[in-house]
């Protein structure tokens, strides 16, 4: 069922309930007051008739009938009957001569017990009253039609029914138009969102001027679009940079081959060309491997092989790896007192990716320092494991701290060293994937400290 209809129905049901409650209460109150009123009148009349009848020495039946007929009439078609203690009728008076009320023994009995018994006889309201005064014992029955009261009640019923129906119809119509205006912004937001595709990702949803939930929704969608656009831009730049990095050695290979093929050459010349091409191919292999690692680290942890990894064992793999990549590079360890419990050294993660992240930072420390040496320190804390990599190299200006973690970014002074500008951004992504962080502190000409922090498996 469309939301618009649902809102209309809910609103109408609520109005119907409130109106029903109000109209019902008003009617019930009027009904009970009318009944109480007529019963009070019947009771009073029964007492006055009883009073007159008990003075039979003063008032004869004819006189009482005359008095009765002069008494102001508050209910019509009156019938008054009186009985002695043995239930024999001793008095009767009615507006219509043939009218009478038949009284059964049960009513006499109840009247004797309670004093008053109210009952209905046809359209008439009636009371059977037990009158007791000095040595007089009488049963007085007074009955009459409360035409005025019934008519007023009927009118009230009609007015209340009309008000109820009018209220419900107004609620239905009002609810329909109200929900239309309420949901109008949703349609506008949906229309705006439909217009947006990858080609015009910079377009935004109109937020309107009124500060309401729709504006909040539009703002939320707009910030989602901001993040998407940022992601797309980043990806576009990444692809551009990666293609550029790949096309450079390819162009170099192509031109070297072109020159070599222009004429017949000596074997030594061919060998030199092939050696150079081999260098370019190795460079490309390294780049594509890094790009593959990047793609792996850009996913979600769900797609990775996650296991418990002993961080000290990962670190101990470094020296061999660093020396294999470059003979002149070296590494020293400083492990603070390691805890005897093995589980304090464990982190949840992908061992190969963690190794790649740490290796990249250690390689940088060796690459960008004169002594080509990196000092690695391991600190075990209650909830996290800290690995700091220190070098005594050229350092990084503070203004570059943010940039160095961007893919393909290289500080100008470092361009002479081999690299793609991917090592740190890859390490950053990997550590973030493991819910950790990388902090950098550096002093130009003094050295740099990178600190990796990852949550300890025991704290998760
Ligand atoms: P690459 O080393 O391939 O250039 P990275 O992403 O690993 O790329 O590093 C980005 C930049 O950060 C480097 O170009 C370098 O300028 C700077 N950098 C990283 N580590 C260090 C370091 N230990 N000392 C000085 N500069 C560094």
Image (cartoon, rainbow, N blue to C red):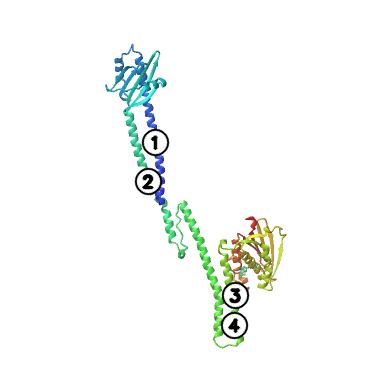
**Numbered label attached to residue 443:** none
The residue at the point 38 percent across, 48 percent down is 176
Q: What residue is shown with label 3?
A: 283
**Looking at this view, is 4 or 225 the one in front?**
4
Q: Which element is circle 4 on?
A: helix
**Looking at this view, is 235 or 270 the one in front?**
270
* Residue 389 visible here: no
Ligand 1 sits in which quadrant?
bottom right
Q: Earlier in the sequence, mark 1 or mark 3?
A: 1
* Residue 458 visible here: yes
Q: Residue furthest front?
A: 105
Looking at the image, residue 184 lies above or below residue 324: above
Q: Earlier in the sequence, mark 4 or mark 1?
A: 1
Side of 194 where 150 appears, left or right: left
Confirm or deny contact between disc 4 and disc 2 (CB under 8 A): no
Q: What residue is shown with label 1?
A: 24
Q: Earlier in the sequence, mark 1 or mark 2?
A: 1
**Numbered label attached to residue 273:** 4
**Looking at this view, is 425 or 153 the one in front?**
153
Whole-percent x and y of residue 10?
41, 46
What separation in Å lies between label 4 and label 1 (alpha carbons)? 103 Å
Confirm or deny contact between disc 1 and disc 3 (CB under 8 A): no
Looking at the image, residue 227 lies above or below residue 157: below
């Amino acid at each position: 069922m469309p939301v618009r209809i649902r809102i209309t129905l809910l609103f109408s049901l609520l109005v119907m309930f409130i109106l029903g409650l109000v109209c019902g209460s008003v009617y019930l109150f009027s009904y009970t007051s009318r009944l109480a009123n007529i019963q009070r009148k019947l009771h009073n009349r029964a007492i006055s008739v009883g009073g007159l009848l008990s003075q039979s020495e003063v008032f004869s039946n004819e006189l009482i009938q005359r008095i009765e007929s002069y008494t102001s009439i508050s209910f019509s078609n009156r019938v008054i009957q009186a009985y002695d203690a043995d239930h024999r009728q001793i008095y009767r008076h009615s507006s219509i001569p043939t009218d009478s009320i038949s009284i059964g023994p049960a009513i006499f009995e109840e009247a004797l017990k309670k004093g008053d018994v109210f009952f209905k006889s046809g359209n008439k309201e009636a009371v059977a009253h037990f009158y007791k005064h000095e040595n007089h014992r009488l049963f007085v029955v007074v009955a009459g039609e409360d035409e005025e009261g019934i008519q007023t009640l009927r009118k009230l019923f009609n007015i209340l029914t009309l008000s109820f129906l009018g209220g419900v119809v107004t609620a239905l119509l009002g609810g329909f138009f109200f929900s239309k205006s309420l949901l109008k912004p949703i349609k506008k937001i949906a229309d705006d969102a439909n217009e947006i595709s990858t080609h015009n990702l910079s377009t935004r949803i109109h937020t309107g001027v009124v500060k309401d939930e729709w504006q909040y929704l539009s703002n939320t969608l707009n910030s989602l679009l901001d993040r998407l656009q940022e992601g797309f831009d980043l990806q576009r730049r990444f692809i551009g940079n990666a293609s550029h990095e790949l096309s450079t050695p390819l162009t170099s290979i192509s031109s070297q081959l072109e020159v070599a093929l222009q004429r017949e050459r000596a074997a030594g010349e061919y060998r030199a060309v092939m050696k150079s091409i081999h260098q370019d191919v190795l460079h490309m292999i390294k780049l594509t491997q890094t790009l593959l690692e990047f793609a792996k680290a850009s996913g979600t942890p769900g797609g990775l092989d996650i296991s418990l990894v002993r961080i000290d064992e990962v670190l101990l793999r470094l020296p061999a790896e660093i020396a294999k990549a470059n003979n002149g590079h070296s590494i020293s360890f400083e492990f603070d007192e390691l805890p005897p419990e093995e589980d304090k050294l464990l982190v949840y993660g992908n061992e190969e990716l963690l190794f790649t992240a740490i290796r990249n930072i250690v390689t940088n420390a060796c690459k960008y320092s004169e002594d080509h040496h990196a000092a690695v320190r391991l600190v075990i804390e209650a909830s996290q494991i800290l690995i700091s990599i220190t070098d005594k190299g050229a350092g990084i200006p503070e203004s570059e701290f943010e940039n160095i973690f961007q893919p393909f970014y290289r500080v100008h002074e470092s361009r002479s060293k081999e690299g793609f500008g991917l090592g740190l951004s890859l390490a950053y992504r990997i550590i973030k994937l493991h819910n950790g962080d990388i902090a950098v502190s550096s002093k130009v000409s003094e050295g740099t400290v990178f600190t990796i922090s990852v949550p300890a498996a025991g704290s998760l």
